[in-house]
Image (cartoon, helix red, strand yellow):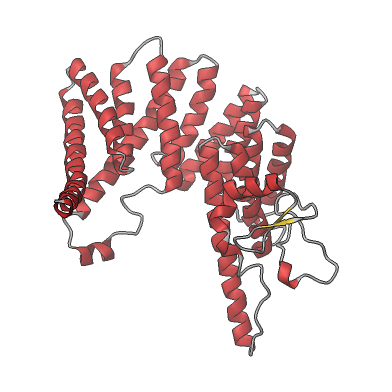
Amino acid sequence: MSAIYPLALPKGRKLRCELCEAPAERVCRGCMVTYYCDVEHQQVDWVSVHETICQLLIPLRTSLPFFNSEEERKHGMEQLSLRQKHLIEVTRKLAQKFLFERKYEESLPAALHSLRFSINVYGLNSIELVPAYLLLAEANIGLSRIIQAEEFLSQAQWTLLKSPECSDATLSKLHRNFGFLNVAKGNDDESLYHFANDIYYASCAYGMENINTAGEYFHMANVFRRQNKMDVADSLYAKVIEIWREHLGNLIELQLESLKIPHDILEKEMEPDEGYLDETQETEAVQVLTAILDVRVRAAKQQPLKTAHVLHALAMLHYLMVDLPKAQEFATQASLLTEQLGNQGESETIQKLLRLIKSKQAVTEKPKLLSRGIANERLS
């Protein structure tokens, strides 16, 4: 599992494939420090993760410079460790993003890289390896490779048993993956047990009304739905939508408030990510909210107000993602439903969002119109 340093290889040591560790015959022409056994593995790795980290690997996989002092050597090793930790985070986020998109094959190489970098930095027995084991388990579950998934989950569980310092967030993810495993094996009772524990630990880590806990309610709801216990499933789906509507509404309010604050004060008072979703959160939100909308639309017994709530959440999400046509489409559908129901309060909330979307569209259209005007002047 250790990283390969091609330019510092002992004489006679063979180069190994980045994915399978078979003897390598090809080299990436971008970084010249990453090797593959064949074209297929090179292409798979490129699509998953290598395109993103290609240049970042060069300083890690070339021979270290000569240090004139112990202080310089210590500083150099610290920089190397920081680069590896950065790559752990990058590869982990990529793997998680692919999982939310259900691109399990693409997720595997990124998760493997995350595990390798974690071993390099923390050692073979560290609790820091558990997130990578869980990513690998989830990807294999998605690919119906149950035996491989069980092996990674067993490794994660064993590592946690040896580590007294285990966070609630990590325990939540462990139970979630055991829940997924039992869903794949058709063990509904076992999956519900693990999803219940998942919700408990997620609530301890983030709070019951947090978006990180919303996903756990969603997974449990899916099991109840498969059991045809629609009342229970429906209440859990409603909980997910309630959490996301509150969160997305707060993000929009934060963005609007930021427009009223002078820029120099804003930089001091707001956190860098405050008022925004990161790419992984966006991907999860799209997947979860779209799935619930599909359940609402296909339900034998229609519940227009609950459907309007999902549409409202999707409209806010796409507004924050600056996909304004989609945001307007969802908001318009939600508005029509609330007007038909005669729900004045809900209708006003959605109308306010529609006005906000249209005003942002007008702002984004101005530069386009201006650039067209300049182009026309040059042509005339």
Quadrant in which residue 243 is drawn:
top left
The residue at 28%/20% (across/down) is: 305
Location of residue 230 in the rendering, given as x and y in whole percent from the top left corner: 46, 16
Location of residue 338 in the rendering, given as x and y in whole percent from the top left corner: 21, 21
Q: Is residue 161 left or right of residue 366?
A: right
Q: Is residue 363 left or right of residue 120?
A: left
Quadrant in which residue 183 is drawn:
top right
Q: Nearer the viewer, residue 325 or 175?
A: 325
Q: Is residue 262 above or below residue 104?
A: below
**Extreme-top residue of the structure:** 300
Q: Nearer the viewer, residue 61 or 135?
A: 61
**Extreme-right residue of the structure:** 12
Q: Is residue 97 above or below residue 349?
A: below
The residue at 48%/45% (across/down) is: 204
Location of residue 72 in the rendering, given as x and y in whole percent from the top left corner: 60, 85
Location of residue 111 in the rendering, given as x and y in whole percent from the top left corner: 62, 48
The residue at 54%/44% (across/down) is: 96
Q: Is residue 335 left or right of residue 85?
A: left
Residue 246 visible in image = no
Residue 127 visible in image = yes
Quadrant in which residue 157 is drawn:
top right
Q: How many marks?
A: 0
Q: Nearer the viewer, residue 255 or 179?
A: 255
